[in-house]
Image (cartoon, coloured by chain):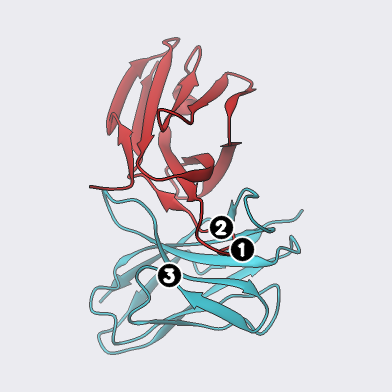
Amino acid sequence: DGGITQSPKYLFRKEGQNVTLSCEQNLNHDAMYWYRQDPGQGLRLIYYSQIVNDFQKGDIAEGYSVSREKKESFPLTVTSAQKNPTAFYLCASSMQGNQPQHFGDGTRLSIL
Amino acid sequence: KNEVEQSPQNLTAQEGEFITINCSYSVGISALHWLQQHPGGGIVSLFMLSSGKKKHGRLIATINIQEKHSSLHITASHPRDSAVYICAVKPSGRGTSYGKLTFGQGTILTVHP
């Protein structure tokens, strides 16, 4: 079945470490997105990519980096520059324009 | 003020009750989405609207573009409907940003048996 796979489901990071969250889709979608969700707040866009080898900053890109070397994959790296990384991270994908977004099950990142 | 506001923030109902969740937005949009987030965190897209009304099973979504308002209704609610319901809009006039959405803070629905 087609869908989006995020891994791992839970992730722990030590202070000062970079960590990479995986997102893979087999829906043949052009666009992919990374969101951050904090308690009591709406999802906020970190980065998005409309096509392979291209990506754009979202509303809260500081302290994060991404790559889009393959259509299926859009990994997110949380760098040590991100001062408050503890959150729930969701990856999504869509076809063009106004098509519904398909979401992964998320990765919960915590700082040790 | 957030561009997308949902009400109520928390909603408790008894099984069988009719439920309404509201979403108001302050920008021009090309589409509005209703999403459901389960306790484990995964999100499912319920509806995408640009006008009028859509129905799927016990769920009904309506939108009034002039009033910048949308509602999600659940008829004959059931405990398995317990989830967070999220409204999101695709603002219009923002170039070629594929699917870039602005989200409400979500409504936590709990349906008791």
**2 or 3: mark nearer the eye:** 3
**Residue B75 in picture, x, y percent from top left:** 51, 14
Kind of residue indicated by mark 2: Gly
Identify the mark nearer the N-term, 2 or 3.
3
Query: Which label is found at residue A5?
Result: 1
Q: CA gap, disc 2 to disc 3? A: 18 Å
Identify the mark nearer the N-term, 1 or 2.
1
What residue is drawn where x is 53% and y is 25%? B61
**Residue B105 in picture, x, y percent from top left:** 32, 45
What residue is drawn where x is 45% and y is 50%? B41
Letter of the chain in cyan = A
Q: CA gap, disc 1 to disc 2? A: 6 Å
The quarter of the image holding the C terminus of chain A is bottom left
Relative placement, left or right, of A73 versus A13 is right
**Residue A103 in picture, x, y percent from top left:** 56, 54
Q: Nearer the viewer, residue B78 or B90?
A: B90
Q: Which of A15 and A103 is in front in this view?
A: A103
Relative to A74, say whether B111 is above or below.
above
**Callouts 1 and 2 in the same chain:** yes
What residue is drawn where x is 41% and y is 33%? B68
Query: Which label is found at residue A100?
Result: none
**Residue A7 in picture, x, y percent from top left:** 54, 69
Kind of residue indicated by mark 1: Thr
The reply to whether discs 1 and 2 touch (Cβ–Cβ < 8 Å) is yes
Letter of the chain in red = B
Q: CA gap, disc 3 to disc 1? A: 21 Å
Q: How crowded is mark 1: few (under 14 residues within 10 Å), some or many (20 or more)?
A: some
What residue is drawn where x is 38% and y is 76%? A61
Mark 2, residue position: A104
Query: Which label is found at residue A58?
Result: 3
Identify the mark nearer the N-term, 3 or 1.
1
